[in-house]
Image (spheres, rainbow, N blue to C red):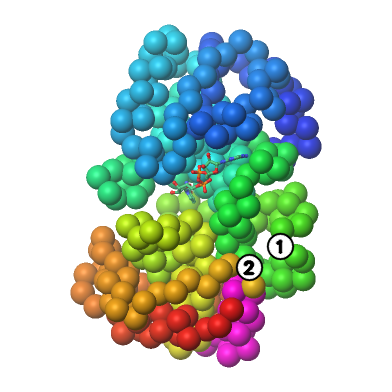
Amino acid sequence: MESIIFSGNIAQDLERFLASKRYSKLGVIADSNSFSACYPLISEALPEHSYFSFEAGEINKNIDTCTKIWQWMTDQGFDRKALIINLGGGVTGDMGGFCASTYKRGIRFVNIPTSLLSQVDASVGGKLGIDFNGFKNHIGVFNIPEAVIISTTFLATLPLPELRSGYAEVIKHGLIRNANYFESLKMQGWESQNWKDIIEKSVSIKREVVEKDPKEDGLRKILNFGHTVGHAVESFYLDADRHLLHGEAIAVGMIAEAYLSKKLCGLSTSALDTITEFLLFVFDKIEIPAEDLEKITQLCFQDKKNEGKVINCSLLRRIGECDYNIPVSSENIIESLNFYNTLKK
Ligand SMILES: NC(=O)c1ccc[n+]([C@@H]2O[C@H](COP(=O)([O-])OP(=O)(O)OC[C@H]3O[C@@H](n4cnc5c(N)ncnc54)[C@H](O)[C@@H]3O)[C@@H](O)[C@H]2O)c1
Ligand SMILES: [Zn+2]
């Protein structure tokens, strides 16, 4: 597993960490936002280094940007002993880690995640990669960073919708693995959280699950709760005027899949109500036109190996306990989206 450092003073802790490492050259990869908001917080702590910055956005998590990164590494004369720092959200971590893992058959890298989503989710678990010809995370590798250094300081500049998007994964962690954690989240106003405690808790849940099943043969699938329907909603709205952030789509997905959990997996009605109420408190209600339900449902079945009319979902038995490989039909999914549509915020 990766070693995770929770930092109370990012500049100081990074300086100390780098002093303990031997490397030939140091490079920093950031996107345009993390470069302007986060790089100034660490630049003085960095020994001699070069940096590469690319335009922010999922759309740039592609092979063209990788080519530029590999060219920059080559121009800088990075050898097998070079060390890369990925400073940014999940896009930077996934793509920077992928480029480092493939350059000269792999050089070491450190992740400094700067969005809530990347701190609680993307930077843990060793999945790296890029999008390819419209397929998300289609090309990639599993590889473990030298370290992940997490500091809540960076969250101060993160736009509120991005913070909330990451919070969807936090809620998911409680729902799939720890009822007390979910309960404690409900008790607090979500914007004024004690982020340090939350990130530590969420990371420990993700790590525990990944440690038991690193390659997603079984248990790791529970991290996909909310993501079967959520990803379909996310893809559907990619083309729409109202673009949804990942966590906003996953919030819809978690409500729909909580409904399926009740129908197929024994989740109680009161638990479904609790989950629905909390998610609608944190996230806006999306209007999904009835005529689009069929298309969204079809998207749930795309690119999956289980051909035909059945898809395997991760569903809740109760709050804090999730099961996986539960077969779900397209009729079930339409019904769950209809349930979502009837809800009032
Ligand atoms: N590897 C994994 O296991 C895993 C898990 C979940 C998600 N992901 C991937 O992560 C990506 C989503 O991550 P994300 O939400 O962090 O996206 P992101 O990297 O695009 O960051 C979101 C936005 O916030 C900006 N930003 C980041 N930190 C900032 C800061 N401190 N101040 C100001 N702006 C800041 C970014 O520039 C970007 O505009 C997706 O590509 C997804 O596939 C990977
Ligand atoms: Zn997610």
Q: CA distance from mark 1 to mark 2?
A: 7 Å
Residue sticking out furthest to the left: 308
Q: Is residue 252 left or right of residue 331?
A: right
Q: Which mark is residue 3?
A: none
Where 344 falls versus 164 (above or below)? below
Nearer-N-terminus badge (1/2)? 1
| In front of the other: 208 or 136 | 136
Quarter of the figure with residue 187: bottom right
Residue 337, position as x, y percentages in the image: 41, 79
Residue 222, position as x, y percentages in the image: 49, 66
Crowding at dot 1, Cα within 10 Å, few <14 / some 14-19 / many 20+, comes out as: some
- Residue at the spot 65% in from the left edge and 56% down from the top edge: 202
Which residue in the protein does label 1 denote? 190
Considering the whole magenta stretch, tell me its main secondary structure: helix
Residue 77 magenta-highlighted: no
Which residue in the protein does label 2 denote? 282
> Which element carries disc 1, helix, strand or loop?
helix
> Which element carries disc 2, helix, strand or loop?
helix
Residue 105, position as x, y percentages in the image: 37, 25
Q: Is residue 203 left or right of residue 312?
A: right
Magenta span of residues: 265-280
Tell me the amino acid under the disc marked 2: Val
Q: Is residue 131 left or right of residue 186?
A: left
Residue 325, position as x, y percentages in the image: 39, 72
In the picture, which quadrant includes the C terminus? bottom right
Residue 270 magenta-highlighted: yes
| In front of the other: 167 or 5 | 167
